Amino acid sequence: MNTISYCRGYLLGQLRRFPGWDAGAGLGDDTVVYLKDDLTVVAAPAAADEGELWRCADPRWSEFCARELGFDVPQT
């Protein structure tokens, strides 16, 4: 059974403020994308790997998500 992980929508322009962002060419800054609990960015909330736009192993990405975007996964 597939489970949908937690995700939160952001405008692509917000994520493009991260140094080194290089995904979503051809999409406008007002495009809504979704940041998942594993810090990957997908085009749709239920998208699996085929909808992935961005994956970054840089620890600064995690810091950016928390500090600049206020991203936090709620505890259940």
Image: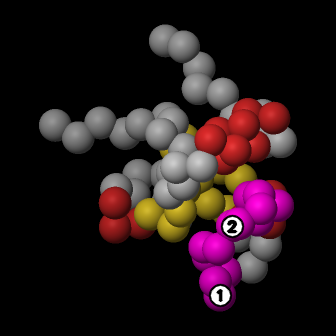
Report helix, strand or loop for mark 2.
Answer: loop
75 to the left or right of 28: left
Q: Residue at x 60, y 49 (%)?
A: 58
| Magenta segment main secondary structure | loop
Q: Residue at x 54, y 44 (%)?
A: 39
Give, as a three-letter code, the residue at label 2: Trp
Report helix, strand or loop for mark 1.
Answer: loop
Q: Which residues are magenta?
A: 15-27
21 to the left or right of 52: right
* Mark 1 residue crowding within 10 angstroms, few (<14) / some (14–19) / many (20+): few
Name the residue that disc number 1 marks.
26
Residue 8 horizontal/vertical position (percent):
62, 43
- Most extreme residue toward the left is 1
Q: Nearer the viewer, residue 50 or 64?
A: 64
Q: Nearer the viewer, residue 56 or 35?
A: 56
Q: Quadrant of the N terminus?
A: top left
Residue 19 horizontal/vertical position (percent):
77, 62
For marks 2 and 1, give the one nearer the viewer.
2
Q: Is residue 5 visible?
A: yes
Name the residue that disc number 2 marks.
21
Q: Is residue 29 covered in magenta?
A: no
